[in-house]
Amino acid sequence: MKISIIGSGRVGLSLGAVLANSGFSVLMTDKEDKKQEVLGKLSFYEPQLKEYLDKTQDKLEWTRWGEKLLSSDIIFFCLSFPIQKKGDLNLIELFDWIKYILDHSKGRKILVIKSTVPVGTHQKIQNIIADNKKITVVSCPEFLREGYAVHDLINPQKIVIGSSNQTAVTKLKEIYKKISKPKQIIQTTPETAELAKLAYNSFLGLKISFINEIAGFCEKVQADIDKLKLIIGSDSIREEDFLNQGLGYGGYCIPRDIETLILSAQKKHQNMDLLKIAQNINSSLVDYFFKKIKNQ
C-alpha cells in the first residue's frame, strides 16, 4: 500500500516517520522551505522523531512534484491553515490540492483529511469532487499532543474515522492497527469527525479556564491550588461521565454548590464568569425544551 502525506509539519512528519517505521513506503511533499525537515534537520523538537527519521530514510521519500503523489493509494492531508482577518481558516491550499488530484488522478484514491478544519469542509470537498466515484474523502482528525506526537501515534487513546465508505474505513483501520494498538476506533459521520477535534480542544480550553478562575479564588482564601487539583482530578469519574446532554444539570447538589461558589467568590471580589455562563446555559434548557415541544 502506497501512502502520500501532504504537509510536513509536526503532525505530517511524525505520521510519516511512524508509518515508514512500520514498513510503509511514504512519499511526502510540502513547500520547498520545509524540505530540510524531512531530511532530518528539524526546526522543532519532538521526542523520538529524529531517531525515527534517521532509521526510516529508505522508506521515507520527499518530492516536490505533485504527480508523484498520484501513484499512492491513500493521501493524508496534514496541512496547517492560516487564519484570515475575519477569523476563518484559509483553506485555499487544501481545495487547490483536491482540484489537482481530481484533474490528474486516474486510479482510485482515498483522501484522508487530518488537518483541523471547520465543520462543513468535507461537504465543500464533496461539492468539488461531484460525481467522481474514484475519489473517497475521509475525515480523520488528529489528537496529538505537542511533545508527545510520536508517542500518541503509537499509543492512541482513540482513532476517529468520519466516513460511510466501508472500504475506506477498513483500509484506514488496517493502517492504524499496523502502526499502533488504539484503545478504540470510532466510526462516525464526516461532520461529527470534523467537530470532534474542535470540541475536544474547546473542552480542554474550558478546563484550563475553570482552573484559572479557581486559582484566583484560592489566592484570596489561602487555599492550596495544587492540592485542590489533586482532589478534583483523582477520583474515578470517567472521561465520558457528565457528558450526557439533557435539561441542564438538575438534581440538588450541583446547582446549589455552583451558586454557593459564585457568591463566595463575589464576596472576595473574584468573578466566576465561566460558572455564571454555566448557570445561564443550564437554567435556559428547560424553556428551550418547552419551546421545541410547542413548535412541533
Image: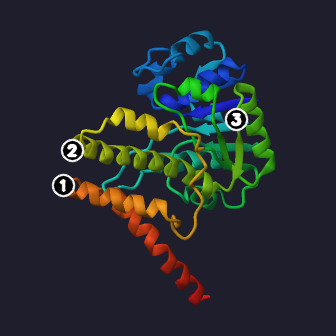
Q: In the rendered view, how is the structure colored?
A: rainbow
Disc 2 to disc 1, how far (Cα)? 9 Å
Left or right position of 94 against 212: right
Q: Is residue 244 left or right of residue 218?
A: right
- Residue at x 80% of width, y 49% of height: 166
Instruction: Report helix, strand or loop for mark 1.
Output: loop
**Mark toward the viewer: 3 or 2:** 2
Label 3 Cα neighbours within 10 Å, binned few <14 / some 14-19 / many ≥20? few
- Specify the quadrant of the image occupied by residue 258: bottom left
Q: Work out whether 178 lies above or below 218.
A: above
Q: Which residue is mark 3?
A: 183
Residue at 60% over, 32% down: 5
Q: Say which residue label 1 marks.
A: 269
Residue at mark 3 to residue at mark 1: CA–CA distance: 45 Å
The residue positioned 60% from the left and 26% from the top of the image is 16
Where residue 294 appears, x then y in whole percent?
A: 57, 89
